[in-house]
Image (tube, rainbow, N blue to C red):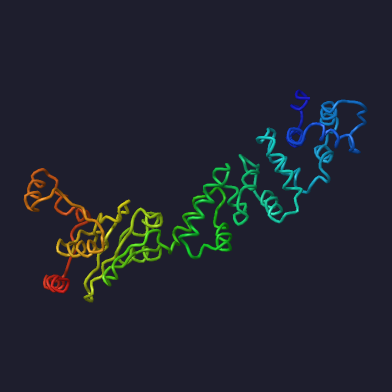
Amino acid sequence: MLAASFCFGAQRRQAMFLVLALVEILGIDEIASHLRSSAITPKFGAATSATVVGQTILSVRRPRDLVRTILAGPPVGLLGTLRRFGPDPVGEPRVYYDCARMYLSKDPADRQRVKVLGQIAGNLVGAQIQVVDALDPVLLHPALVGCLYEVRQVTEIQDALSYIRARCSGATDDAIRASLCRLKPGGHRGDLIRYWAARFDIPPVELDLHDDPTLIALDSAAALADAGRRYRNCLATRINEVFLGSAAYVEFKPGRRGTPGLIAELRHTDQGFLLEKIYAAGNRRVHPERAQIVRRKLSACGIALLAHAPGEHEPVVAAARLLNEHTLVEPDNDAGWGVEMLEVAQDLEQFLDEAA
């Protein structure tokens, strides 16, 4: 039988694998009993169960008829799916059993799984039978199933979407189902997560700014994108960091009208938040006096500041300059493209007086 099977076409080979898989799972005597009672198979007399199975596979040449010997029908679409497996076994016998079960099932979820399998273009690859069997019914869409080849990827995307649901108020089942249409042929499953991350509106970590009206947490994708436009910087590209809780951004908006604001970049640690950088518009360096105001306000909210060796400030700074460690002077204000421009020096002095 093995030698003869190499001459079979792909669909006939898959029909044979289906029969052998059911033999493995249900037992050879059970399958032989079905074959003996089939109108398609020859009379076997007192032949052993193994002989019955072997002779059936060799003598029943049409794949449809071979499947009909053990499955009524056969179920619509099953033969087409078997053909799309190609000529080789697709995995453990359980894969064939689950495939047949889905096509025989009347359960709406299984009917949807069968429909999705029929909508995927090309051959079925990897573990796509197990994928549709394990996938949440909300996610049963050919565009997504076409991006999944292993069962572990199903677990990965379902875990990621559970996080999405916690961070996006709009991530209802209907909205997630509708968003699956955005996946393009040849795309990546991560495209779905990126789509939803760009819409998060529930911060993963609450930032307590003590109701200071001059400090505004940029705690949603929309707020970050808006601030990025207003400050002409790359805040829109930092959405993923905030969405995942590794960073946070705060806008400092002075109460005095016309005074430019600042952006503070915070890092999330296991001890709370740490001020990492302060930026003016266009990612310019902040005037030291204005930077100090922001530090003072954030420190009052329990946010840690970068520091140096204890003791008087000037001796440490003098040593740092001679060692070419210039960033120690203002470690959170050492980057940027030039220093921010304030049009009138008196404006800065008045602003500092008001802040004090």
| Residue 53 place in picture, x, y as percent | 82, 30
Which image quarter holds the C terminus?
bottom left
Vertical placement of residue 150 versus 16, above or below:
below
| Residue 144 place in picture, x, y as percent | 58, 51
- Which residue sits at x=60%, y=53%? 136
What number of labels is visible? Answer: 0
- Which residue sits at x=70%, y=52%? 110
Q: Is residue 128 left or right of residue 218?
A: right
Q: Nearer the viewer, residue 314 or 254?
A: 314
Vertical placement of residue 75 versus 230, above or below:
above
Which image quarter holds the N terminus?
top right
Q: Is residue 176 left or right of residue 105?
A: left
Q: Nearer the viewer, residue 342 or 298?
A: 298
| Residue 43 place in picture, x, y as percent | 93, 31
| Residue 224 place in picture, x, y as percent | 36, 63
- Residue 127, quarter of picture: top right
Residue at the top extreme of this rendering: 3
